[in-house]
Image (spheres, rainbow, N blue to C red):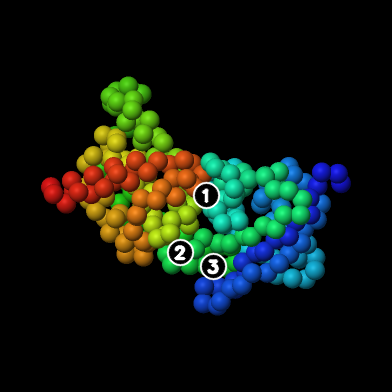
């Protein structure tokens, strides 16, 4: 069909976290530029199943840029060549006929490969369970203006809460640091009155769990912010550092 593309894919294949993986080369034909990247992978997997071969394992759920499951390293960038989009929001019109596309899983010791492109990100869940919540009784839902919150604080909290926990920040960081993720989760509560009661224990426990999971240190290269599909700001890292120092000094 006119306008469709033929592509070569070099995809990481790995049976499980114990075995060594390698790149396998596949060809896909007549790919519509209006397909999403995941839809293109669906076509490839249908082709592999029809040939009696093992399909490529990859994570996906909502396919609406909300859940963060569609985590692929595409041509050296988390979620592909565009800024501010997840893999499921990346369309094949971002590529051209004849392209070679290299696809890998997130690379981090804290994100062990489950199979192929799917990695275990339960380390993020354990960080959240360590302190990313409000357990005090905040009462019933209040009228919008009954608790006065400065608009700048409300906006910053809302922007931090936009983090979908996809792990692109970890994949982009040369040290596999989770500072952007953790700082966003700390900030969304630290900026609001409901989060003040547990502020000290929250940041201490979440940072301790982050370190225990084996994530690396932040060296302020800002790669995390540049590759975050939700444009989470590194200002949250500075805020978390202030929260952490205040907790240790109190």
17 to 168, vertically: above or below: below
Q: Is 147 on the left-hand or right-hand side of 65?
A: left
View extreme (bottom): residue: 19
Q: Position of residue 22 (x, y in %)?
A: 61, 72
Q: How far apart are labels 2 and 3 at the CA level?
A: 12 Å
Q: How far apart are labels 1 and 3 at the CA level?
A: 17 Å
Q: Is 91 on the left-hand or right-hand side of 247?
A: right
Crowd class of label 2 (few under 14; some 14 to 19; many from 20; radius 10 Å): many
The structure residue drawn at horizontal position 41% and vertical position 36%, both measured from the top left corner, is: 159
Q: Which residue is mark 3?
A: 114
Q: Earlier in the sequence, mark 2 or mark 3?
A: 2
Q: Position of residue 96 (x, y in %)?
A: 73, 48
Residue 100 appears in which quarter of the rendering?
Answer: bottom right
52 to 130, vertically: above or below: below
- Depth check: give the residue in front, 209 or 243: 243
Label of residue 108 in the image: 2
At numbered mark 2, what does the secondary structure look like: helix, strand or loop? Answer: loop
Label of residue 92 in the image: none
The structure residue drawn at horizontal position 18% and vertical position 46%, both measured from the top left corner, is: 246
Q: Which residue is mark 1?
A: 68
């Amino acid at each position: 069909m006119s306008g469709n593309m033929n592509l070569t894919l070099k995809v990481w294949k790995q049976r499980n976290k114990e075995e060594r993986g390698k790149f396998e080369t596949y060809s896909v034909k007549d790919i519509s530029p209006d397909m999403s990247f995941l839809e293109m992978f669906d076509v490839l997997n249908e082709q592999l199943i029809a040939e009696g071969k093992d399909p490529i394992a990859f994570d996906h759920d909502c396919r609406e840029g909300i859940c963060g499951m569609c985590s692929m390293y595409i041509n050296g960038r988390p979620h592909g060549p565009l800024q501010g989009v997840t893999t499921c929001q990346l369309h094949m019109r971002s590529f051209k006929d004849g392209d070679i596309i290299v696809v890998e899983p997130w690379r981090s010791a804290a994100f062990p490969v489950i199979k192929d492109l799917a990695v275990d990100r339960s380390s993020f869940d354990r960080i959240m369970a360590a302190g990313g919540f409000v357990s005090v009784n905040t009462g019933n839902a209040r009228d919008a203006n009954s608790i006065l919150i400065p608009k700048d604080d409300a906006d910053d909290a809302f922007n931090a809460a936009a983090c979908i926990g996809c792990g692109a920040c970890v994949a982009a960081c040369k040290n596999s640091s989770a500072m952007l993720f953790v700082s966003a989760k700390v900030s969304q509560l630290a900026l609001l009155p409901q989060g003040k009661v547990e502020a000290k224990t929250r940041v201490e426990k979440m940072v301790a769990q982050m370190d225990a999971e084996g994530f690396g240190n932040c060296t302020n290269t800002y790669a995390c912010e540049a590759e975050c599909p939700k444009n989470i700001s590194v200002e949250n890292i500075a805020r978390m550092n202030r929260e952490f120092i205040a907790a240790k000094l109190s």
